[in-house]
């Protein structure tokens, strides 16, 4: 939990950003790209029971009232189906009631940007069932400049073996809880793919400041008129959708 400790100069849109793509609720408030409050909360209760009280808390920390919010931003996943639906529905409802824009930011983008390092990134997020969401992102000057391969979900080694050319890039920055949990397996596979021992791999621990990066990213996208709708990026179908397909 953090806040700036002072009444900031409010020159620029006030943005409320939330990420409910995992069991941890992540929220931030920024004035343009200046983050003035951020929260990361993990508990056993579902987001549907806690999110609005958490929004109230982060707004109190920022000393911001509902009607002062100029825009809303949500992490769009991939991640928890239920968590994403709750977060997106909540923000869209608030945005509609206040007649303010609501934009989405890809969660794999966020983790790559949160590293604070330019270069090639492998983002691996836990997807449950021993699987990971996996995507490659190229970061330059604090922006996503390329997504050289389509995002995938599956068992870590199965997914990574399908994209060996990207694992040979050096240095390769690996981010996300999945990358850290499956660090040994990923390192072994990359070692096997090395050419002349040139690949350098950097594994970053989880706990990157995702909510602040989400708010800052949203401010930049608004400034550059690159607003994307807050639509979920699931990668894989939900169990309900898979069940419907099997019955057809």
Image (cartoon, rainbow, N blue to C red):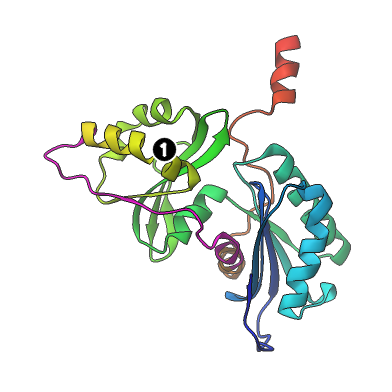
Farthest residue in the front direction? 44
Up-down relation of residue 101 to residue 152 (above or below): below
Mark 1 element type = loop
Q: In which quarter of the image is residue 10?
A: bottom right
Up-down relation of residue 18 to residue 33 (above or below): above
- Please provide the residue range marked out in magenta: 193-215
Give yes or no for residue 207 being in the magenta stretch.
yes
| Residue 45, x across and y down, in percent | 77, 48
Q: Nearer the viewer, residue 235 or 100?
A: 235
Residue at which label 1 appears: 182
Up-down relation of residue 58 to residue 127 (above or below): below
Give yes or no for residue 217 being in the magenta stretch.
no
* Identity of the residue drawn at 82% across and 62% down: 53
Residue 248 visible to an observer of this rendering: no
* Identity of the residue drawn at 69% across and 38% down: 81
Q: Quadrant of residue 141?
A: bottom left
């Amino acid at each position: 939990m953090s806040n700036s400790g002072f009444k900031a100069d409010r020159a620029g849109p006030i943005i409320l950003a939330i990420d409910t793509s995992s069991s941890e609720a992540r929220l931030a408030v920024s004035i343009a790209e200046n983050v003035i409050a951020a929260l990361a909360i993990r508990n056993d209760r579902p987001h549907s029971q806690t999110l609005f009280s958490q929004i109230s808390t982060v707004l109190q920390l920022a000393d911001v009232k509902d009607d002062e919010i100029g825009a809303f931003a949500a992490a769009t996943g991939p991640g928890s189906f239920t968590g994403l639906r709750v977060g997106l529905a909540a923000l869209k409802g608030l945005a509609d009631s206040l007649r303010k824009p609501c934009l989405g930011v890809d969660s794999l983008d966020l983790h790559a940007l949160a590293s604070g390092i330019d270069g090639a990134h492998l983002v691996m997020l836990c997807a449950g069932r021993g699987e990971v969401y996996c995507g490659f992102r190229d970061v330059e000057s604090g922006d996503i400049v390329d997504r050289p391969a389509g995002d995938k979900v599956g068992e870590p080694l199965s997914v990574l073996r399908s994209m060996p050319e990207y694992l040979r890039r050096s240095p390769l920055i690996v981010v996300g809880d999945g990358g850290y949990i499956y660090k040994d397996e990923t390192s072994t596979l990359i070692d096997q793919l090395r050419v002349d021992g040139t690949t350098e791999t950097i594994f970053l621990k989880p706990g990157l400041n995702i909510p602040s990066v989400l708010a800052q990213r949203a401010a930049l996208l608004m400034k550059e008129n690159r607003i994307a709708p807050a639509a979920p990026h699931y990668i894989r179908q939900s169990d309900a959708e898979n069940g419907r397909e099997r019955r057809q």
